[in-house]
Image (cartoon, helix red, strand yellow):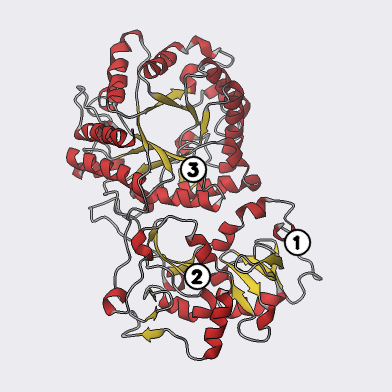
Amino acid sequence: MMICVLAALLLAGPLLYAPRATSAEEASVYTPETGFWVDPLFHDYWERNGGLMTFGYPISRVFYQDGLHLQYFERAIFEHHENQTGDWKVMLVRLGALNTTERRQDVTDTPFVYRTADPALDEGGLYFSETGHALSATFRDYWERHGGVQTFGYPLSDEFLEPSIEDGVLRPVQYFERARFEWHDEFAGSVFEVLLGHLGREALTKREVPPLALTPQTETDTERDAPPLGPRPTGQSTPVGCGFNLAFYGHDDSENFNEFYVDAAAESGCEWLRLQFTWRDMQPNKGQPVSWTIWPYLRVVEMAEERGLKVLVNIAHPPDWARTTNKRLPAEPEAFGAFTGELVTLLAGKVDAWQLWNEPNLIGETNGFIDPAGFLPLLRAGHAAVKAADPDALVVFPGLAPNSIMRTDLAISDAWYLEALLAINNGEAANYFDVLAIHAYGAGNHPDTYWPGNLAGNPGWTEAPEFYFRHAEQLRKVMVAAGLSERPIWITEMGWPVGNYQETWGYGEWITQTMQATYTARAFAIMRTEWHWVENAFIWHLNFGEAGGPDNWYTGFSLFSHDRQPTRAYDTISRMSKTWQSVTE
């Protein structure tokens, strides 16, 4: 119905919207049909690439989502990339790709199966080896006249017949990275014979957005020039479990140390502990039974169990004997699977979740070469071992170190690494974890700042995405693009340091205890009111103040001092968690 109404309006005479252009920067359009402005950020791109005919009416204000300022239109979502220049400052969300993720992984869905060029099939069209499909002759002229690859992306399917979501009519369609093209025979010979599907409207029904973003605007200069809406709640608060990373000792006189901090974790009202079990310490020699070294690890797990705490165990750091000559493999997968199987069998029913490896996108956590394809065999072997030994235990993906570097001998972008891993073998890695883990640090910056649209005004550590807590939204975006929007996400490391103990995180120099407490509380508020995809979050770190000593690199992150005094952040988390429990009970 919407298509027919649009055609009638356009064929009947002048368009019903009225341009307002006081300068090149302020050029915009108000659309009374929906009650929104085509925002000045996007008006030039909208107009140059087909305007109303191509993208439809705006159906939202400009607001913050997935780390960017964007605006929904009937047929597209516009993103503003402030760190880009020229024509690349505005891009369209890859709605065509997002809508077809599962279909492109289904080898029986013929229109989406990658194929080689075929002169007979491709006559009049244009084949793209990048995606294994040809731009149909039916849609080629429209595609080329309205922006081509830059606007719509590559074809993701061949042309085929599909019933319309809006009216059920069977029509020729073709999916592109950022659009669905539809051929309307009833408008053949007119400018309406090719129309884009309403992917923007469809996407809006699937996302929670701030209510103000969908509140119609008035036709005033004030509304036209209003700044984008910043991050804000998108609905009712959702529960987020809290936990701590805990350092523990295994020698005989450590009982008091371990008990003190496990008690502190339980008394805080949080539900979880994250413990790192080091493979090289538990199995220093090849073939050595894990049962020989299990006691101190078992004891701290039992302490947590006795106090009603849940336990996430992170397995990391292989022994030298498990290294391989293949530098792309962090360790021998078969050996890792065997060790994991023994360990999980010994602790079955006591450990709630197992995290397989830690930060494999850093060189120090690999065998000399960072490679997602090299990590996949470890993930596969570890998952099989956990599920065989304790089918009810969760398998958690290793948290990736936040960074935007691209060096295989140093560090690889966490977003790139995750995207690359999930693309291998048509998404095989998704079969090997129940929960995605994210490491979300904020450097010295407030959790409401973000890159590149709202940079912090601090003296350093502000000019890259990984310096912001909200960088976690980019990892969530990768999961959505991979068709894993329903997969739970845990933040297994997060925190702000007080004091400059090491130049890598010298930003702690301007962080006070009050700021650490305020930032931590605000981060949990963001997760509860905006990030409904986060289930649990673990503070780094509960007790490194004593475990590492007063001058350790990590001491600034600790919620207890070297002499066991709680920080303001610990007290804040305790009050916060108990308030949540009283609300939900």
N-terminal label among 1 and 3: 1
Residue 61 image point, x, y percent: 37, 68
Residue drawn at 62 percent across, 71 percent down: 181
Disc assigned to residue 116: 1
Q: Quadrant of the N terminus?
A: bottom right
- Spatial CA distance of label 3 from label 2 is 45 Å
- Marks counted in the figure total 3
Residue 211 image point, x, y percent: 36, 60
**Residue in front for this viewpoint, 520 or 117:** 520
- Seen as rendered, the residue at the extreme bottom is 13
Residue corresponding to mark 3: 409
Name the amino acid, label 1.
Answer: Thr
Name the amino acid, label 2.
Answer: Glu
Residue 413 appears in the picture as rendered: no
Q: Is residue 284 above or below residue 333?
A: above
N-terminal label among 1 and 2: 2
Left or right: where 166 falls relative to 45: right
Name the amino acid, label 3.
Answer: Asp
Residue drawn at 33 percent across, 53 percent down: 233
Residue corresponding to mark 2: 74
- Seen as rendered, the residue at the extreme right is 120
Judging from the image, what secondary structure is the residue with disc 2 in?
loop
- Seen as rendered, the residue at the extreme top is 252
Instruction: Please say if the residues under marks 1 and 2 sit with CB atoms less than 8 Å apart.
Output: no
Q: Is residue 578 above or below residue 165?
A: above
Residue 473 image point, x, y percent: 41, 50
N-terminal label among 3 and 2: 2
Residue 546 appears in the picture as rendered: yes
**Residue in front for this viewpoint, 129 or 343:** 343
Residue drawn at 31 percent across, 85 percent down: 22
